[in-house]
Image (spheres, rainbow, N blue to C red):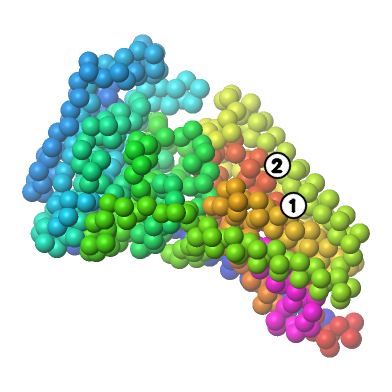
């Protein structure tokens, strides 16, 4: 039985390695003090001033101090700052504050709008617009316990990122830039994205000369800076984003965000047909729109991560005349993309996703045919396994909903699917996943204890469920298709090898690949989605976790039970 012990060791090592590598995707780069390039340490000197007081549109004095500080800082860099101002009397926006601090969207605004605009000219007037808002969250939301933010992250991170980028390019001669750079520090984002809406409405440069927009936001004081939203038909957009160093993005996030009711300044630019990307940290929601969003809690490493991604994109954009074409980013298809290893982005088109899905369906059919022919699968057993797997998925989703709803009741907050603020939210998240994992693991031990090969029925069932979902999402929400396709594809290949080849090492290679690919996709993504949707989304998170386990657990039992021919005969 020596080979079985070897199999268990290989399986355990591969699982641990895949988990660690997946978690490393979420690691942020160390803050740099080198001012010859993007320096988070230098950016933090701006941030300390900007976030010294709450500076919402309702904190008039502090709000004006921040605006003047930005203007003076940019001027000291040798840049010309334009003030784009609108009087409240000339606007039909609503968003006055009630006596209790809440926002009243029925009353006309009681503040003027003041944006700051900087142009760094290139050979072509066509250029990239970089945006961040300088107002902090000032109004309260009693149901979410929000208000009084110092704006260190939201959107101090965005503002100082733009300041640092402006510093880097302030003295670059026009002749060295093929395209222009435009910087806009917007006002009144927190009360209705008003500053961005006015630039989109009234700024002729935006309309005629901007072909790419980069918005920098933050939700939480630390963590990776995710590129979480793109414009539609983003194949050309993603070609530029692929130049980023240490990319952090998943097309499932951009696909889901596109159908949600969340808005940022980027929305105003999307509404007038601009192409581009939207960045944000993802962190504990209890540091978002609250006084805890202050300088003492921020991570400089998160600021550095913005720069590591954005600087290479700007370098590429300003170094090639092809980007001077206003229609350059007009794509025909969306892209599918995801982090597969730290710093490595997998990316392909919707059309490629269709071809891959067709290939995946074919491979799954071949896997079933080979396994049935070899006597490794039986139709009746496989159908029974499919019913159990479907039941496990439904139960996992129900458990997630139950835990999130119960947690909301305990803390006294209204339950919300994508925004549930609770203290120590990691506890119900961990409990939910642990219960699902333990229940499924115990079931597998009991089911496969005497007959490890019975796991093949459950693997075939899990692969079938994933390939069906891959096909459905390919044509309805292509950005999510990779979640189901790659585990199903590599798992089907492993099933073919297991059913038709007796080579001990080759079987291990394919089983290891199936679990490594699945875990590299799911480990960082599930945690990122938890931060994004909060525990209100545990229903969906548990659902995805169950889909992953439908491949991982059967593969583990099959791989752990592998033996060499010699050991099998001796047994």
Residue 495 highlighted magenta (yes or no): yes
Tell me the quarter of the image containing the N terminus: bottom right
Q: Position of residue 9 (x, y in %)?
A: 70, 74
Q: Position of residue 3 (x, y in %)?
A: 77, 82
From where the camera sits, is residue 131 visible? yes
Which residue corresponds to mark 1? 438
Residue 489 highlighted magenta (yes or no): yes
Q: Position of residue 181 (x, y in %)?
A: 20, 51
Image mark count: 2
From where the camera sits, is residue 167 visible? no
Q: Nearer the viewer, residue 49 or 545?
A: 545
Asked which quadrant contains residue 509, the reply is bottom right
Which residue corresponds to mark 2? 397
The crowd level at tag 1 (other Cα within 10 Å; few <14, some 14-19, many 20+) is few
Which type of secondary structure does the marked residue at label 1 adopt? Answer: helix
Left or right relative to 327: residue 412: right
Which type of secondary structure does the marked residue at label 2 adopt? Answer: helix
Magenta: predominant secondary structure element? helix
């Amino acid at each position: 039985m020596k080979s079985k012990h070897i199999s268990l060791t290989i399986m355990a090592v591969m699982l641990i390695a895949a988990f660690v590598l997946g978690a490393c995707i979420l690691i942020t780069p160390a803050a740099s003090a080198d001012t010859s390039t993007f320096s988070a340490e230098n950016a933090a000197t701006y941030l300390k001033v900007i976030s010294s007081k709450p500076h919402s549109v309702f904190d008039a004095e502090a709000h004006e101090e921040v605006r003047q500080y930005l203007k003076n800082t940019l001027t000291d860099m040798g840049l010309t700052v334009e003030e784009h101002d609108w009087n409240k009397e000339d606007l039909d926006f609503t968003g006055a504050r009630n006596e209790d601090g809440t926002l009243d969207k029925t009353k006309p605004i009681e503040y003027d709008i003041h944006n700051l605009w900087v142009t760094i000219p290139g050979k072509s007037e066509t250029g990239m617009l970089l945006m961040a808002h300088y107002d902090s969250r000032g109004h309260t939301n009693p149901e979410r316990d929000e208000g009084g933010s110092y704006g260190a992250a939201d959107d101090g991170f965005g503002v100082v990122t733009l300041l640092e980028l402006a510093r880097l390019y302030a003295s670059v001669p026009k002749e060295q830039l093929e395209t222009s750079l435009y910087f806009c520090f917007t006002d009144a984002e927190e009360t209705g994205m008003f500053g961005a809406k006015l630039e989109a409405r009234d700024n002729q440069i935006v309309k005629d000369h901007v072909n790419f927009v980069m918005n920098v936001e933050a939700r939480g004081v630390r963590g990776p800076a995710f590129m979480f939203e793109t414009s539609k038909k983003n194949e050309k957009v993603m070609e530029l984003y692929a130049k980023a160093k240490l990319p952090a993005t998943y097309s499932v996030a951009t696909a889901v965000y596109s159908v949600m009711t969340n808005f940022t300044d980027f929305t105003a630019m999307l509404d007038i047909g601009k192409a581009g990307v939207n960045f944000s940290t993802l962190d504990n929601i209890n540091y978002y729109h609250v006084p805890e969003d202050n300088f003492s809690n921020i991570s400089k490493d998160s600021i550095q991560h913005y720069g590591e991604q954005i600087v290479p994109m700007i370098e590429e954009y300003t170094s090639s005349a092809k980007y001077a074409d206003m229609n350059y980013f007009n794509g025909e298809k969306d892209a599918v993309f995801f982090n597969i290893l730290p710093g490595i982005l997998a990316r392909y088109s919707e059309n490629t996703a269709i071809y891959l899905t067709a290939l995946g369906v074919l491979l799954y059919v071949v896997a079933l045919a080979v396994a049935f022919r070899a006597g490794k699968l039986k139709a009746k057993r496989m159908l029974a396994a499919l019913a159990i797997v479907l039941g496990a998925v439904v139960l996992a989703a129900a458990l997630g909903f139950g835990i999130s709803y119960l947690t909301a009741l305990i803390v006294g907050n209204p339950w919300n699917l994508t925004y549930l603020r609770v203290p120590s939210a990691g506890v119900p998240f961990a409990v939910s996943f642990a219960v699902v994992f333990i229940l499924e693991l115990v079931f597998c031990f009991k089911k496969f204890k005497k007959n490890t090969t019975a796991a093949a029925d459950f693997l075939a069932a899990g692969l079938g469920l994933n390939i069906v979902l891959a096909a459905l999402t390919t044509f309805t929400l292509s950005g999510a298709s990779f979640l189901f396709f790659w585990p199903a594809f590599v798992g089907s290949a492993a099933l073919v090898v297991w059913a038709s080849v007796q080579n001990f090492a080759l079987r291990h290679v394919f089983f290891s690949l199936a679990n490594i690919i699945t875990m590299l996709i799911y480990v960082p993504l599930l945690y990122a989605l938890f931060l994004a949707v909060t525990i209100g989304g545990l229903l969906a998170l548990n659902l995805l976790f169950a889909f992953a386990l439908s491949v991982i657990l059967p593969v583990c039992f099959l791989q752990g039970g592998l033996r060499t021919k010699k050991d099998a005969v001796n047994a």
